[in-house]
Amino acid sequence: MKIYILIIVVFLSFSAIAQNNMEMLWQECYGGSENDLIYDIEPTENGYLVFGESNSNNGNVSNNHGDGDIWIVNIDSTGNILWERCYGGSEPEVPNDMITTENGLFYFWAWTASDDGDVQSSNHGGYDRWIVNIDNEGEIIWEKCYGGSGTEYGGKLKLLSNGNILTYGPSSSSDGDLPAHYGSLDVWLMIITPEGEIVQNEVFGYLGHNNVFDIVETNDGGFFMASKTIMTGGMIQGNHHGNTDVWAVKLDAELNIEWQKLYGGYYDDYGHRGVLELEDGYLFLASTNSYDGDVTGFHGGFADIWVVRIDLEGNIIWQKCLGGSGSEHAGTLHQTDDGSFVIIGETDSNNGDVSGNHSAQGYSDIWMVKLSESGELIWQECYGGQMNERIYKGVVKKSESNWVLAGRTSNNSFDVNCDLHGFEDFWVLEIEDTSTNVIGKIKNENGLKVYPNPAQDYVVFTSATHGVAWSHPVSETKVTVFDFHGRRINNPVIYYMDNKIVWDTKEVKNGIYFYKMEMEGKVVSGKVVVQK
């Protein structure tokens, strides 16, 4: 019997303050005596799967196959290890991404040069795209190599609304699973079934270097991606600005180009990790060191995070450079309930937009930034020690005020306070905004009771204060429901009766769902499990 732990998180939107007041709830370091590099974290029913690469075979790490393995650590909600496992063969495996499905299975993507050990699906040559499906105990369900005789580099996975999986990243092959090849490095998009069968397969690019760090499935069934290009020609059309431009592409459901546009200045601009679809267009993150063309506000260092908001036709609504005199790189992008945006990445600056960096010169901190809906900086905060703290995709947003970050660390100082095992360890920490003390206030004065949980046919929302009605008609309460992956559920069946709101779940699939309620001028959210 599965035991579900109900986590109801209640929050308010952050106020516009210069700097956040985050409290670290817990932190842990994981690794061995060699380099252990973290890439991602995914929530489970009672904790998290932490995903990365290990070169160790001691400390927390066991049964490493060879020259760098994929290492997955299953931890509980406060960081205690439940199990750990290495995946790979005798050659290097480099991790990229992990996703969770609604039925509790996990998929990870690495690139591998092995053809032994756990890699039993026949490497095509060079580095292949290696996709592995595991259960919640870490056992391999299936694994498969995709690629050609060249090199298929790192990329990501995206669970689609129809249950299939989009895989995307750069490729240099012209054979094998690749349907085409245009230049030194192409964008390769491939959609597979949950069992690993290829259902769609397209390559995008021209003679130069093209790459993609992020893509989003759009409400019309298509896709939007922010890639890169060094030249125009072939399928790449537009006004090229300089060395490297952001190549933004809107695709339909069949992966045909609907429209495309180039953005940038004279120097290097390319799409990075972070793409959102908005009601009136898109928001994407890029890296830039330009100060002309489409780019204004560059801080003069090696690279800024460039935030660009465009309309549905690709016209720029606003753009902003974030950074200082050093180098900034994006990790993940999130939209908050008040329409603002939170960016989590890394910085080695301590001026410009950046303050509170703990690192010595040349090293980086994890950097968290909140922007308003119109692109104004609301607050920023650095997390780290004296040496390098870095982050890729490793973020779980538990609520507006509660985050779990999975980065890497190399020094026990300042924010880093855990037992290091070697040169670089996995560093996982949970942080919470304590500046407004809103959690207790809402529970006591405007409390919400949600039952049953787990639910079968219905979920009831009512006042947690027995015998006391809400101070306004419940029919005025707006209820929004999202699935486990943050996708909004269209037209949930909601009934309003007396002092209760009822969500009819008879036709809802089993899984974990999140709700958001706008009640009495406040925003309340939480998590509920549907289990039939």
Image: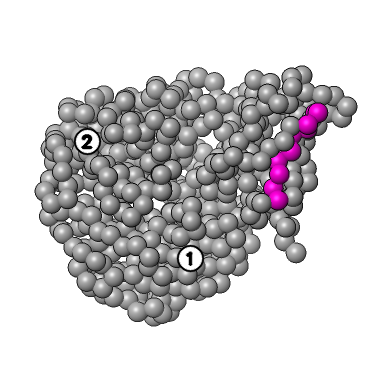
The rendered magenta stretch, by its main secondary structure, is classed as: strand
Residue drawn at x 47%, y 28% as measured from the top left:
340
| Whole-percent x, y for residue 502 in the image | 74, 38
Residue drawn at x 12%, y 45% as measured from the top left:
232
Q: Which mark sits nearer the N-terminus, 2 or 1?
A: 1
Would residue 296 be found to the left or right of residue 426 on screen? left
Q: Quadrant of the C terminus?
A: bottom right
| Whole-percent x, y for residue 249 in the image | 27, 44
Q: Name the residue under label 1.
A: 194
Q: In this view, does 58 lie above or below 305?
A: below
Q: Magenta span has 487? A: no
Residue type at mark 2: give it.
Answer: Tyr
Callout count: 2
Q: What element carries label 1?
A: loop
The residue segment tinted magenta is: 497-506
Residue type at mark 1: give it.
Answer: Pro
| Whole-percent x, y for residue 279 in the image | 43, 32
| Whole-percent x, y for residue 118 in the image | 44, 76
How far, Cα to Cα, is label 2 from label 1? 35 Å
Q: What element carries label 2?
A: strand
Q: Is residue 211 above or below residue 514?
A: below
